Image: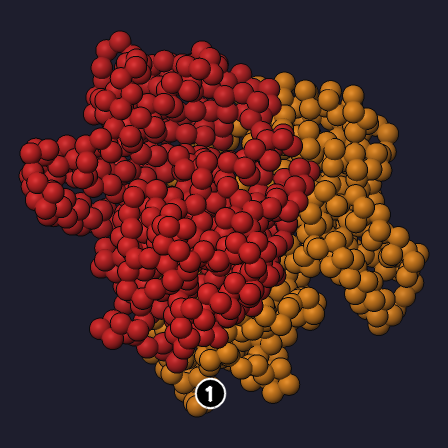
Chain colours: A red, B orange
Amino acid sequence: MNISSSEVIYALNALLGEGGILESSQDMSRYAVDWAGDRLGSPLAVARPRTTEEVAGIVEFCHRHRVPMVAQGGHTGLVGGALPDAGQPELVISLERLNQIREIDPLNFTLSVDSGCVLQTVKDVAAEHECDFPLSLGAQGSCQIGGNVATNAGGLNVLRYGMMRQLVLGLEVVLPDGRIWNGMRALHKDNRGYDLKQLFIGAEGTLGIITGVVLKLFPQPQETRTALVAVPDVFAALGLYALARRSCCELLSAFELIPRACLELAFEAAPDLPDPLETPAPFYVLLEITASGPVDLEAMIEHLFDSGMQAGQVLDGVLASSDAQAARLWRIREAMVEGQQLHGEHLRTDIALPISTLGNFFNEANRAMAAISPQTTVIAYGHLGDGNLHFNLLPPAELDLTAKRVLLHALETELFAIVEDYQGSISAEHGIGRTKQTAFLDGLSELERELISDLKQLFDPDDLMAAGRILPRVTDPAIHYQSQE
Amino acid sequence: MNISSSEVIYALNALLGEGGILESSQDMSRYAVDWAGDRLGSPLAVARPRTTEEVAGIVEFCHRHRVPMVAQGGHTGLVGGALPDAGQPELVISLERLNQIREIDPLNFTLSVDSGCVLQTVKDVAAEHECDFPLSLGAQGSCQIGGNVATNAGGLNVLRYGMMRQLVLGLEVVLPDGRIWNGMRALHKDNRGYDLKQLFIGAEGTLGIITGVVLKLFPQPQETRTALVAVPDVFAALGLYALARRSCCELLSAFELIPRACLELAFEAAPDLPDPLETPAPFYVLLEITASGPVDLEAMIEHLFDSGMQAGQVLDGVLASSDAQAARLWRIREAMVEGQQLHGEHLRTDIALPISTLGNFFNEANRAMAAISPQTTVIAYGHLGDGNLHFNLLPPAELDLTAKRVLLHALETELFAIVEDYQGSISAEHGIGRTKQTAFLDGLSELERELISDLKQLFDPDDLMAAGRILPRVTDPAIHYQSQE
């Protein structure tokens, strides 16, 4: 930084006008903390641009004066990526006021929006035009589209619609030097040279700030069937998945694995929730099929039940007979996450594996955890249809906080080693940010590290934008690496 | 090149052994020509590696001695990208012997293959395991998977399954310096840092040579319904599309627009083909729905017919009652392409537009073509469900070749200007290669050109790999541009 904090604030106030810059600790406090309550440092200031040009003006200014900056969406990230740094003060660029719907084209099945639009708003606008924007997350009431793109968000419907990367047709990005790249194309096919937008999707704001997005829409589902099925083990759940992929055609939109322990957690958080089936079972699958046209979903799901029963994969099941009953089934999925929070310090993971290995992985990982700490409770649920498990761990309640953290660290290290053996991923959908960085770097080959670092240097040679996320800062002498050139 | 051609051949012969290098003009002739009969220069030699390590050895050698090289798949490209250069002799690296199936995992819905596998072989292997690899192209009997990835191939089923980019989970790539990047991940979700494989998909071999691919599979369709529907105009076809997207749910796998003129061309190429409907209509839609499970497709398509009739969008239609009849309907789609070839010199284009603008675009482009040359026949068909038109032009037969070319060039220039007005793409699925380069560069912003050029320089600073494709050679002094750094 070749300028003082007060000079930054003075200049950006002039650029953004009234309300554009927040600088008091009170005003800035909510920008220093995320959904999970994590907090690192305080912002240098918070800039709240309303237009792409204002974003470009801020970034150009920061680039010129070497002011570190980080873009911020809805504070719902899970890896600390958007939190202002604890080391050097960063200018937080909040996109919350860049939140206009630009254009909806229902016949083209596209929707163009500012990146600060809240996901739920986007879904509502699509629905008003009988379209569906299918990204579905717990945080959808507050997360922003730009953050969803920057982190390549996943969620509940990836099985059918893909991750955010597959739902983006065009982007507008302010590059780290303040130039605006206009890639707002509303084309379903476009093979003109390198697909530059792919670079920014999932880059967690390290290569540019996303200001506009063209989203791909789908027909709005007219009918939905939700079911909870009891299964004896993970292998049976996998067999049922293979059946369901086929017999439900492409209409299967969710296939969630839920062990009994998760149901118990859900009942802790929501004691009024009824046990959905008479006899408790070791595992459950929560599945949903939806259709935008005339398909007999009931027959489809009953056919699946019957086949599953015959194959010994299904023990019992309930098919929701009303929207209210379907909502109660989905409430289990939410309440079990809330139930984990009630237990205080615990380990959340977000791993992906080849689907076919999930049964063996599950057994081996459970054995390995028990070998280290028999009193630790494994809470492993997830998007089985994507091979994505949240293999979470609740340490014994009697340990103190330090002992819990030491234990959880040891368990995580062992778990990630098994993930590596199974050629899996230590981050299926949450990204790297800061909290996954060490594990990410451990698994990275020399060549990959060089390529990622070269790309970062190409776009942001001064390492000013979201520095220290994904890769460590290049200014840290211990981990400085040269580009090939 | 700091080495003679014979030294290259000598060294690579030693590396690859018997049959690994072809050097006689006779042996090399088929590597100098593509499917459409286009030809530019002759190869320096043709290398035919059988393993990734051999590819790496060749590339490392070429990198060290500054030997220009180009990877080659099944010679089915349409933009001259894989043809050896006419200026400086290039080593052709043919992937035809790198063609092993590596691993199929039907429960994970993935298939790992060498990049030289022919698309049809890949489809067959998937089918043996009751899976489907849905990429479908006219050239599927000879095109190779690596070429499909390098060009981000499209084809007939993009509407439902996306382009090649959406069908790739992992890649193995030999970088321009000969290092092997192993990104052969078989994970449906993986958010670990930058998604490097996206760089190579659609880069037309300019950033590396793809040697291995992990493909995403789908359940094999069990039932298919194919129909040809007569519609009064493009607007009606669009209305029917909006209906079909909804009422056929996600089961709609093709929605092809065919004007009457194309049927006439099909009859020229295949005189035994019957006119599919009693009364000729201005336009037809060839549509297909498929399902892997128990869905009443017949009821679905009849519901669509009825709705379309009531809305005045459907004049008449035929639903294939047998596989043979369905094949005859698809035969029209192939024969009309063959029919165009019978007319000699003509213009093939591959444009994409926002789907909602196709009606207005179609009218405006037709008027503009007629204003320049009333005797030119417009043959505009395409994947309406993707907004992708092959807006082709047959010049008056009485013109000589030179006059035809001059006329077609003028028409293309005008057509592309209209595409630009409609915010469309001049290359929906064929890529840039050489033949689309001028039009591509004309439409490229300064910033995009800089970014693309910087990426190329980062990966291939000596401009040795597929040089002159997408962007001009950097060694051409007239078009030399510096990286920002």
Please name whichever residue, A436 or B147, is drawn nearer the observer in this view of the structure: A436
Which residue lies under the disc numbered 1? B1
Q: Is residue A429 above or below residue A303?
A: below
Is residue A71 in view from this perspective? no
Q: Position of residue B99 (x, y in %)?
A: 41, 56
Q: Is residue B363 above or below residue B478?
A: above
Please name whichever residue, A414 or B295, is drawn nearer the observer in this view of the structure: A414
Chain of the residue that carries numbered disc 1 in the rendered image: B
Q: Residue drawn at (45%, 74%), measured in percent from left and top?
A: A65
Q: Residue drawn at (34%, 42%), measured in percent from left and top?
A: A35
Q: Position of residue A192 (x, y in %)?
A: 61, 61
Q: Position of residue A272 (x, y in %)?
A: 30, 14
Using residue A96 as the reference point, say whether residue A100 is left or right of it.
Answer: right
Q: Residue drawn at (53%, 16%), measured in percent from left and top?
A: A296
Helix, strand or loop under label 1:
loop
Q: Residue drawn at (70%, 50%), measured in percent from left and top?
A: B353
Could you say which quadrant of the image residue A437 lies in? bottom left
